[in-house]
Every structure is written in C-alpha cells, then in structure tokens.
Image (cartoon, helix red, strand yellow):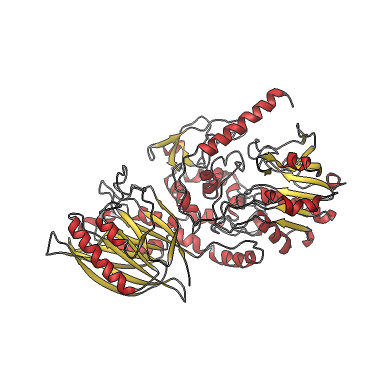
Amino acid sequence: MGTAVKLFIAGIFALAMNHLSASQESSPIQHTDTVCIPGAERTEEYLPLLRNKKVALAGNHSSMIGRRRMIDSLLARGVSIVRVFSPEHGLYGKVAANTPVEDHADPVTHIQVISLFGHHQKPKPEELRGIDAILFDMQDVGVRFYTYISTLHYIMEACAEASIPVIILDRPNPNDGYIDGPVLYPRFKSFIGMHPVPIVHGMTIGEYARMINGEGWLRNRKKCSLTVIPVGNYRHGQSFDFKQPPSPNLNTPRSVFLYPSLCWFGATAVSDARGTFFPFQAIGSPLLKGKYDFAFTPKPITGMAERPAHANDTCYGIDLRNYPRGAFGIGGRLNLQWLLEMYKSYPEKALFFNGENAKSPDSILHFDYLVGNSLLREQIKRGFSEPAIRQTWEAGLKKYRKIRSKYLLYADPPAAIKVMTWNIHHGADKDEQDRLSHMASLINSSGAGIVGLQEVDSVCSRSDNMDQAAILASMTGMHHLFQKHFAFQGGAYGNALLSRYPIGKVSSFRLPILSDSSKTVAFFVADLHVSKKTMVKAAVVHMDYRDSRSRINQANMINRIIEKTKCRYLILTGDMNASPGTAEVTTLTKYLKDVTNTKDLTFPAGGTDRKIDYILSGKGLWPLSSYVLESTDSDHLPVISVLDLRLP
C-alpha cells in the first residue's frame, strides 16, 4: 500500500473518531457501575489457549487491546497469527456498506487478510488449512440486520465442519437494554437476517454465538467447539464508552442507538441521512418539502456512502441529532412512529417501499428482508395503529425470550418502569390546533407504562366535546382514569392517568387554591398492579400557577397524604408551576426524590426557558435514566423517567 493511501485511511479514521468524540450528548442517569472490561482486555484468560497454536483472527478496526490493534498486540506477545478474516466494511472499517471487500495483505504485518464480504461469506476449507484456532473479536450493536453476527455464523459453521475451535472475545452490546421487533420468519432468511430472532435481540455477540450453537442453527445442526471470554463487570443495559465506531455510518453513540429504528428507511423512498456526517440521525425526502422545516442534502462520501439515496437533492424531514439516548436504554423500544408518520406524510404511497410495484409475486422486497416478514409492510399500508402492530409481535417475542434465557452470560437489566408526565394543554398546540392523535402516537412510541396528564378536557366545547382521556386510552391500548378540577364549557377540566397496568383502588383528594377560595383542584393516588405481587401507587397533580403560597400549601397537603400511604413504590407526576430549588418543590422532596434531570427545560415548547414539570418517586424506585422529548404538540414538553423497581 502506498504512502498516500495509508495517509488517506488514517485521515478518514481520524475524521470518524472526531465525530465520535465531538458529539455533545448528555449521558442519562445511571446506577454507579464498575467499568466493564471487554473480553479482548482479559488477556490472561485466553493467551494460554493460544500457546503453541497457529491462530486466525476474525476481526476488524474494533479489535483492539487498549489503544493497540489486537493483531499487533498479540504478535508482540508471541502469538502466531497466520491469517485474518474480515467482515463487511473490511479490516479497517473504512469500506461503505454493501460494498464488496477484496482480499489483501495487512500493510503493517504482511499477514493475509481474507474478506468474508467479497466473493464469499463463509471461510473455504483451504483458507482454514493449517489453522489451530480462530479468535473472533468485533464490536457488534445487537441488531439482527447488522451483518457481523452473520459473519460469526459462517465462521462457526466452517469451523464446526473443520473441527477448529472458536474463541470469542466478548464485548458489550450498546442496544441490549431492551428486546423488540418482529421475530424473523424462515422465508425471509438472508445475510441481513439469518436466525429467528427479533430486530433488537438483547444479547452480546458471545451469548449470541452460544445460542447459534445450542439451537442447532448451523448447517446439519453441527456444533462448533466454542469458548467465550466474557466481559468483566458487566450486566445487560449497562452504559459503556465506544473506543471505535462500529462501522462507518455508526459514527456516534446516538447513531448506534437510533440505528435499529432507522435502518429500514434505507429500503424506502425516505433517506436515513446516509451521505451526511450524521447518518442514522435524521430522516427525510425531497417530496416532503412544505411538510417539514428541517432539511439536509445527502452527498457521496468515500468510505461512508458513495451512492446515497437522493444524492445532491434536498431532503425535508425530522432531525434526530438531539434525540435523547436514554429513550433506547433500559426499558427502551423500537420507534415505530417515525416509520408510520413518514408513510402517512409521503405523497406517493405506491413508491414508498422501494421496488414494491416492480416486484414479481415470488420476489421479496429489501424492506421485508430487514423486517423479517412482509406483514409489517402490509399493516402500514392498511393503517394499523402501533399497538395493533405490536400485538402481532408478542407471541414470537415471548417464545424468543425463553430461548434467549438459556444462553445468557450476564444478568438482565433490573425490572424497570417507564413513567411520563405531560401537560397536554387540552390536546392542542400553542396555536390551538388539535394534536390529540399526535400525542397518542408520541405516547405509544415512548413505551411509557405510566403517564400522568395535566390540562385534560372531558367533553368540553373547545375540544369538540371529546373525552380526551378515554380517546388517548383507546389509541394507546392503556387503562385510564380522569378526575376533574372543575366544570368547564359544558364538560370538565382536570388530570388524567394512563396505565399499561390494571388500575385498582383510587384515593381522591381536593387541594385548595388560596388565590380563589371558590375553587379546588383534583389530586388522586391510584393503585397500579404492575405484577401479581407488586403494586405501585401513581399520583397526578397540577399545582396552582398563580400563587407560590398556594403551591407551598398544596405541597404540604400532598406530603401529608403521601406520608399516610407508607408506600415505597409511589410515583408523583405533575406540572408544579415552579422551578427546581423553590420552596414548593423542595417541600415535595421531603418524602420523595426528584428523578428527572434538573437541567431539562420543559416549558414553553419551541423555546423552553424553565423546568416546571416533574416526576418524583419513593424510596423503592431508583432512577436509571431521565429525558425530555422534543414536541410541539402541546405548550409543554413530555418528561420521561425510567425507574428501577427495587423489590425487597
């Protein structure tokens, strides 16, 4: 390789790393975790297995020991590396997706590098000749259509046939805080989906290899001689820092978290922002001009996206560069809403799914290969709601979770409850336009299990006599409860609760308004049965906006009510109309703790300058993450906290 080529590769690598380190992304609240140790760093565990053996390394740019390439580090330790197998994107991680990679010699070590994403995907018998063991080390992202697990499958299969042991150096999975998506149907098996697993499978690559072996997914149900060097000090859902971008277009942590929810746009008429330096962090199309203000222009980028969709055309859509990473941590889920919204907004429905009107009856669309079935595409076209779509996933997910449990090496995340609080401004935006259905979509996509709502109308004339709590419950498939503050415009105005858990006993109270003795506001505490043995109490409040004395008085009354409940699992959601550190908010923290981020501003939407919306919890609940979702559906932003349910 010439000096100019080496400098070019080094420059692209530095550019990717600059994008990784320069991203201004706030970390969610986390448990204090011991720093995890990737399997590659635990050399004392696997070097003895390599002694006096001829070793092939299956790896790429993420195969590092500390800051040094694994191939160089192991050679310096006396390991005999005779061959390297590389996956999609090549050994250096600088080849664009879906681009064949040629065999070559590593310019530093002169060791032969055999591409498993070029002329073939499975090592040939002659390529394994003379090898005593294969050492596998790649940073995966825990998504079915990310091809490193397909390369893993073929390496295991070839080694099983040749009686060569495989040693996997395990690494954390950035997307293993949740499991979601349809399980792949056998007819849709391909290199971007080889196994009957959901889109987000919730396993490290070492655990996944154990499942491939144990479930007999290799050809002729052969078993590979497999050793996994586990990650030290790790549990599923634990945060960790990337030392290398996993692939060219996953160049920031946020792109990695958004990838499972955006990759399917690559098989539609909507761009996933490949061809920019923020791939998988925006979506849009030239045909959506006038429907969205945000715009971007994809352009060919060597080593990232050399033939991007809509190259040099301005695309209009949704900017996700500031979307909270915590939404895809513990308690997360795929965001279906963006896909449903894009299809609904796209003016030429027949052209939305690439190749749909040109396919033969027996052909399979790229979109269907990514999803793992053709059902989702048909559901979208027929206008299925998100809850209805998700219901069709449940049986497959339940079966998969049982299979997965047999192969885990690490503890699963703690039992988590996702809570939202949102002042919905009687279902209208700041211009008084009805946004109730959009609010339902946001609640659905958030995955919140408990939602406290303020400023809710019940059959009021200003909101077309809609029972807003009941309508939201119907659209989200949740239980609901409404309690009125006072009569208003032929109906009632008050607070509401949506819950994915059955609602039991409800205790109702009235809080006085000192500035208007003729009025009181509702406050209620509802029992939610989150499991057969566990009950959580959820309370919703909207404190007086006019008078701090009134709010302090209301806070003291709430404290007396909470004290009497003696419940460790109590959640208070509300619009407190007060900033952090004020007397009324401080009063509420006598028995509860604020589990939201102090710096997350919530009002007014479109130009927030203060935080007045809160989630507080009892001692039995611990914050895992908290974030605010950007929305202009109301004049307030929705706030979400993910809480660890610490069972005694």
Residue at point 63%, 64% (across, down): 404
Answer above or below: position of 295 versus 515.
Answer: above
Image location (x, y in percent) of residue 41? 68, 48
Image location (x, y in percent) of residue 617? 37, 63
| Quarter that holds the N terminus | top right
Asked whether residue 397 is in view, the answer is yes
Residue at point 41%, 65% (across, down): 477
Q: Nearer the viewer, residue 254 or 292?
A: 254
Describe residue 509's horizontal placement relative to residue 445 as left or right: left
Which of the 4 image quarters holds residue 410?
bottom right
Describe residue 31's horizontal placement relative to residue 434 as left or right: right
Asked whether residue 466 is in view, the answer is no
Residue at point 18%, 58% (across, down): 549
Answer above or below: position of 104 versus 529.
Answer: above
Image location (x, y in percent) of residue 346? 44, 44
Identity of the residue furthest to the right in this view? 130
Q: How many marks?
A: 0
Image location (x, y in percent) of residue 79? 80, 44
Q: Nearer the viewer, residue 326 or 444?
A: 326
Q: Nearer the viewer, residue 286 or 64?
A: 64
Q: Nearer the viewer, residue 64 or 603?
A: 64
Answer above or below: position of 117 versus 161.
Answer: above
